[in-house]
Image: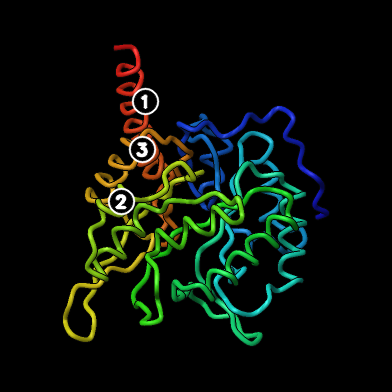
């Protein structure tokens, strides 16, 4: 099947109060045959870099009716090596083809010396890393012709070479490159537990004015080699109440942006994802209502 350019002339932008889910082929019938129940869909870019086939057939049908967000997992933005030009060219083609409203990537690295690793790995927050990340973000934005959102990671180890906080690092990247930020609230909770910092304080200090999208997801609980609690960002279960509370706290800062429910493992029925979307929408609308009331008072 040849893949042709997708028109979005009748597609409105993702509303800032909108909530969406990742596009899964298991849900195709529910999406195409049922009522409209989510505001947008998000895809992982690397799953659509091949030519034609069922993935593109479904995505073209979805794109005719829904706004789209593209989320990258393979650019290795945080690596010291130059970006893979072939990968970047495939990303440029995908962006041009489907014209998404949003594009995001992780503050992480996933390749070294031509070897791609099946993980998103952390980096030290210092001036050397900052220079590499800023150069990579600028290169991506120049190539694809749109603003990129950089996501705060979930991490399990920290570096002694770090000389600034994660928030200071993200703020510096956004200021130098003009990129936006993706605030993954679940990642904040996971990293806070794993490293022993205060998640609420992180949310309060985050440069909320830069946020162009929120992510919410579930996590798994484990223990490290010393028997200490370890959280894993597995996207395989419902969003925890603690994460919902942090999301409510972020919304209370009066920054509204599209919210994605991430659920990539142990894929549930579409109706389960819709319930999570509805819960996010309710929190957004409650906060926007409070905001409007305060302005009218």
Check contact, mark 3 vs mark 1: CB within 8 A. no
Separation of disc 3 and disc 1 at Cα?
A: 12 Å
Residue name at image x 77 percent, y 56 percent: 93
* In the depicted structure, whether residue 197 falls above or below residue 276: below
Q: Earlier in the sequence, mark 3 or mark 1?
A: 3
Instruction: Give the left or right position of residue 20, taking residue 62 as reference.
Output: left
Residue name at image x 47 percent, y 38 percent: 257
Separation of disc 3 and disc 2 at Cα?
A: 10 Å
Instruction: Give the left or right position of residue 244, taking residue 229 as reference.
Output: right
Classify mark 3: residues with Cα within 10 Å, few (<14), some (14-19) or many (20+): many
Residue name at image x 56 percent, y 65 percent: 73
Provide the residue designation for mark 2: 239
SS of the residue under disc 1: helix
Q: Which mark is residue 280?
A: 3
Separation of disc 1 and disc 2 at Cα?
A: 22 Å
Instruction: Give the left or right position of residue 168, taking residue 172 as reference.
Output: left
Provide the residue designation for mark 1: 288
């Amino acid at each position: 099947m040849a893949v042709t350019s997708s028109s979005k002339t009748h597609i409105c932008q993702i509303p800032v109060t909108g909530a969406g889910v990742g596009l899964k082929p298991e849900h195709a019938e529910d999406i195409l045959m049922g009522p409209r129940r989510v505001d947008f869909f998000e895809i992982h870019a690397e799953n659509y870099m091949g030519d034609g086939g069922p993935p593109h057939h479904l995505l073209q049908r979805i794109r005719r009716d829904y706004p789209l967000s593209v989320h990258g997992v393979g650019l290795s933005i945080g690596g010291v090596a130059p970006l893979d030009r072939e990968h970047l060219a495939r990303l440029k083609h995908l962006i041009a083809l489907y014209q998404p409203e949003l594009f995001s990537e992780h503050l992480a690295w996933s390749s070294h010396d031509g070897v791609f690793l099946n993980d998103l790995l952390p980096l030290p927050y210092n001036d050397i890393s900052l220079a590499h990340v800023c150069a990579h973000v600028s290169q991506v934005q120049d190539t694809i012709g749109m603003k990129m959102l950089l996501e705060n990671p979930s991490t399990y180890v920290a570096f002694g070479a770090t000389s600034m906080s994660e928030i200071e690092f993200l703020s510096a990247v956004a200021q130098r490159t003009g990129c936006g930020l993706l605030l993954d609230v679940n990642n904040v909770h996971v990293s806070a537990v794993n490293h022993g910092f205060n998640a609420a304080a992180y949310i309060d200090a985050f440069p909320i004015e830069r946020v162009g999208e929120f992510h919410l997801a579930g996590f798994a609980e484990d223990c490290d080699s010393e028997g200490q609690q370890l959280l894993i960002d597995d996207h395989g279960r419902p969003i925890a109440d603690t994460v919902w509370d942090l999301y409510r706290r972020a919304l209370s800062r009066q920054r509204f942006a599209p919210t994605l429910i991430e659920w990539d493992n142990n894929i549930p029925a579409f109706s389960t994802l819709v319930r999570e979307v509805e819960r996010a929408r309710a929190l957004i609308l409650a906060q926007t209502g409070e905001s409007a009331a305060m302005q009218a008072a």
